[in-house]
Amino acid sequence: MYEELGELKDWEFVGRRGGGVHNLIPAEVIGSVPAARRAAEQASQELGLNFMDDEAVLKMLRLRHLDELHMFRSGAVLGVPLALIGSGFGVYWGAYVQYWESGRNQLIYLVVAGTLLGTLLYFYVRSALAHWRDPSRQNVRARAREYRNVARIARAGGADVPPRYPYYGPYPFAANYHPAAKELELPENKGPA
């Protein structure tokens, strides 16, 4: 899934959820459309990233991929056990406990199952909220969303920008810009060459 950014060549980034490696469209191509250039300049002022700087945009797209990987991993670490244990409790309840156990044992079973599932659910939600509320990660999402809009304007204006570039959808939430947030950095020796 191209987890290591070291596998990428110059000017490459990974699309949504490892959907493939793509080349960055140069800023001169996007900027060749006056409306896209104006949108990029306005977004640069609002979001603290020069959208006409290829290296800055490439870094942002790579950070967006790492953000998505982190989100997926943090969801899977607790989401998969939650689903498996919850299913196991449900099947065991349906196949055995409700028919063969006494009312007292059924109550004990429900309390234990509810406590365990509630605890797992609590940590799952807490992990998701911590990820989505992180202001630095929200900055990356806000910038990626705006870059997608700039690329769309350039494509509509006749620039040679492929459909769906940069190959992921918009972030409908958790993509607010926080000017005081710490800037994220790429892992060591994984930045653009």
Image (cartoon, rainbow, N blue to C red):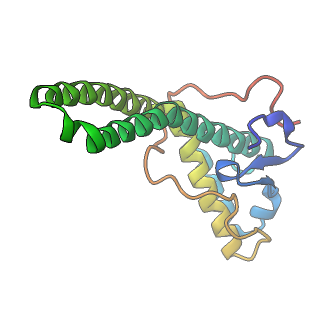
Q: Is residue 144 above or below residue 123?
A: below
| Placement of 162 over or under 182, stated as above or below | below
Q: Is residue 125 visible?
A: yes
Name the side, left or right, on which 157 lies relative to 193.
Answer: left
Question: Which of these two is toward me, 90 or 43?
Answer: 90
Looking at the image, residue 87 sits to the left or right of residue 72; the answer is: left
x and y percentages locating residue 176 in the rendered image:
46, 43
Name which quarter of the figure residue 133 lies in.
top left
- x and y percentages locating residue 12 in the rendered image: 83, 48
Q: Residue furthest front?
A: 100
The answer to which quarter of the image holds residue 187 is top right
Locate residue 99 relative to residue 69 in the image: left or right: left
Query: How many labels were placed on the picture?
Result: 0
Q: From the viewer's side, name the closer residue of 52 and 73.
A: 73
Residue at image location 44% in from the left, 43% down from the top:
174
Quadrant the C terminus occupies? top right
Residue visible at 78% across and 56% down?
Answer: 27
Quadrant housing the N terminus: top right
Q: Residue at x 85, y 47 (%)?
A: 11
Q: Nearer the viewer, residue 138 or 1?
A: 1
Q: Is residue 31 shown to the viewer in this render?
A: no
Kindly indicate the quadrant of the structure image that contains residue 130: top left
**Taking 89 as reference, is 32 above or below it?**
below
Q: Residue at x 27, y 39 (%)?
A: 96
Residue 22 position in % (x across, y down): 80, 55
Point out residue 57 in the picture as x, y percentages from the top left corner: 72, 45
